[in-house]
Image: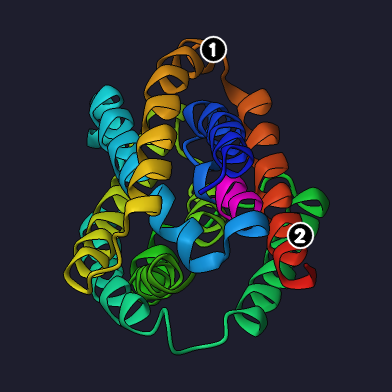
């Protein structure tokens, strides 16, 4: 990669890591479309894979005290892992533009519904019933385009969990599905020298930014956190549309 491309990798990783450290999502949602503008979707997915897994492991462990109040994690992770296998195997074979547009439209509908009904809350019965399907779709998205945050965050937002429980839940799901994707990509020989250099730059950036963002996130709670998560979800929809149109 050129020096300009590497600078974009660093800048995109810094922006994505800061948002992720505060809301639990946002790194691949922001970084993948920006990096893809100068390097292509497959390169972008590979570049963010390792730093994204590492960030999720760190944040999941940092918020582990919230696990006791989590819901449906085993079902979401189990079916998410299966979906990640399917999606990653299809990464180089399937067109991702229609999928991203459908996802973006779904996100916008959810946010509009939430604005109209701020007390929107998914019942335990509903989440238990539909969590396998949501986990599978999230895993497929993670494997196919490297972005599962919009699916997971939109679904988990309806649980209305406490901040640390929400962070623990989403980063646990992201971490496991992202690790499955990474193992398959490496087994397929997707790591090249240019991708390795760019990944190293992204990893250092994420390692520096994530702890700073976590400190800021610990000051947030309640409505402020909810609105910030919604803003990131909307931003993710815009990023997906941008990636399709460019």
Quarter occupied by the C terminus: bottom right
* Mark 2 lies on residue: 113
Q: Is residue 146 visible?
A: no
Front in this rendered view, residue 5 or 223: 5
The answer to which quarter of the image holds residue 84 is bottom left
Task: Rate crowding at label 1 as few (under 14), some (14 to 19) or many (20 or more) other CA atoms within 10 Å.
Answer: few
Helix, strand or loop: magenta stretch = helix
Residue 216 is tagged as 1
Residue 59 is left or right of residue 18, and the answer is left
Q: Quadrant of residue 55?
A: top left
Q: Residue 81 placed where, x, y %?
A: 24, 68
Residue 105: give x, y in percent of width and height.
Answer: 74, 71
- Position of residue 165 measured from the top left corner of the image (x, y, whole percent): 37, 34
The stretch of residues the image draws in magenta is: 29-35
| Placement of 234 over or under 160, stated as above or below | below
Closer-to-camera residue (133/119): 133
In the rendered image, is residue 218 in sight? yes
Left or right of residue 230: residue 88: left
Camera-side mark, 1 or 2: 1
Give the structural element (helix, strand or loop) at label 2: helix
């Amino acid at each position: 990669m050129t020096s300009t491309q590497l600078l974009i990798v660093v800048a995109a990783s810094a922006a994505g890591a800061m948002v992720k450290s505060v809301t639990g999502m946002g790194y691949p949602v922001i970084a993948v479309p920006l990096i893809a503008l100068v390097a292509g979707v497959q390169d972008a997915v590979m570049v963010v894979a390792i730093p994204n897994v590492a960030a999720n492991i760190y944040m999941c462990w940092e918020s582990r005290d919230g696990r006791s109040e989590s819901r449906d994690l085993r079902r979401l992770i189990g079916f998410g892992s299966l979906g990640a296998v399917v999606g990653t195997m299809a990464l180089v074979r399937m067109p991702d533009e229609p999928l991203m547009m459908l996802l973006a439209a779904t996100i916008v509908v959810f946010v509009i519904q939430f604005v109209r009904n701020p007390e929107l809350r998914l019942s335990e019965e509903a989440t238990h019933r539909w969590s396998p399907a949501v986990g599978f779709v999230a895993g497929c998205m993670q494997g196919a385009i490297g972005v599962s945050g919009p699916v997971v965050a939109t679904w988990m937002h309806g649980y209305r969990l406490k901040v640390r429980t929400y962070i623990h839940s989403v980063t646990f799901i992201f971490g496991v599905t992202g690790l499955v994707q990474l193992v398959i990509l490496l087994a397929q020989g997707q790591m090249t020298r240019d991708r390795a250099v760019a990944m190293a730059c992204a990893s250092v950036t994420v390692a520096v930014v994530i702890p700073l963002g976590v400190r800021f996130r610990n000051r947030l709670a309640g409505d402020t956190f909810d609105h910030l998560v919604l803003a990131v979800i909307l931003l993710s929809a815009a990023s997906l549309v941008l990636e399709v149109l460019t």
